[in-house]
Amino acid sequence: MENALISTNFFLKNQKGFYRGKVRDVYNISDKLLVMVACDRISAFDVVLKRAIPHKGQVLNQIASYFLDMASSSVPNWKIACPDPNVTVGYYCKPYMVEMVIRGYLSGHAWREYKEGKREICGVKIPDGLRENDRFPTPIITPTIKAMQGQHDTDISREEIIKQNIVSKEEYEQLEAYTIELFKIGTEAAQKQNLILVDTKYEFGNHDGKILLMDEIHTPDSSRYFYNDTYEEIQNKDQQQRQLSKEFVRQWLIENGFQGEEGQNQPLMTDEFVESVSNRYIELFEHITGNKFVKSDYEHIDARIEKNISTYLENLN
């Protein structure tokens, strides 16, 4: 297998802090800027898996950049520049502890809950008689509370978020409005490429009193896509949908006895499986953007990224 960018450990000019997320390494520059390096780590069930996926970080960063630019006229976001294929620089924000998950179809986590007999998710009632991947009449918002490292995100209702003052009522209503608008933009963009945006999540932060969309958007890590032209036929036959997302990795883990629960051991991903995951990420990039993916070279990748970030920060002064 090819090399992968597992992590970075830079010491940048005016660096004030550092945080390593599940996928991104985040550098705080003077409480003014955030430098996010998208690495090739992959997570599932809120656990970082032992093997990284070549080119995954570049795919995530470039898809997110594509959609941040597309949506910027409708929803303000944090992005300022992408000085490297794996890097986005943006405004320093105080993140809201709520992730805004929006679902157009009964899939993934929502389906697993529904299959167990639940008919209410995050305070949203769901009718009986639905099949996996059926379309909701109207997209539903099922927010979660961001997990601390090593823990699972937690479902929560709109009412509880406001009651517990996790987010004020006024701010939450704005988050909902932005979420609906972003999902509309993503849905229309997907349709143009013969895809269905099934569900996704958005993260927001506050910058100088203004709510900004943060982090990634409409990537295979945060979203699920089906193929539009075969959706109805497959659904009518009650078969599994063809999809472009990280869900097939979750399904592989489930089949191999792992869902991130205590006492479970991660199955080892083979070279062949890792390559198939990498190819799926690249496939989604090319489908959703309509552009050919150009793989960056892994030789001296750390030095390249650090130089590109440093040059960008120097030129700001």
Image (spheres, rainbow, N blue to C red):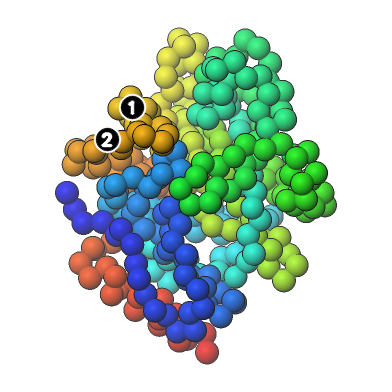
The local secondary structure at tag 2 comes to loop
The local crowd at label 2, few if under 14, some if 14 to 19, many if 20 or more residues have their Cα within 10 Å, is: some
In the foreground, 6 or 179: 6
The vertical placement of 140 against 72, above or below, is above
Residue 125: which disc? none
The local crowd at label 1, few if under 14, some if 14 to 19, many if 20 or more residues have their Cα within 10 Å, is: some
* Residue with the mark numbered 1: 257
The residue lying at 53 percent from left, 30 percent from top is 109
Q: Residue 185, position in %: x, y?
A: 62, 45
The vertical placement of 312 against 255, above or below, is below
The residue lying at 39 percent from left, 79 percent from top is 11
Residue 267: which disc? 2
Q: Look at label 2 and name its amino acid.
A: Pro
The local secondary structure at tag 1 comes to loop
The part of the image, by quadrant, that contains residue 200 is top right
| Residue at the extreme right | 170
The residue lying at 59 percent from left, 58 percent from top is 214
The vertical placement of 21 against 31, above or below, is above
Q: Residue 34, position in %: x, y?
A: 53, 70
Q: Look at label 1 and name its amino acid.
A: Gly
Q: Residue 278, position in %: x, y?
A: 29, 45
In the foreground, 295 or 87: 87
The vertical placement of 30 against 89, above or below, is below
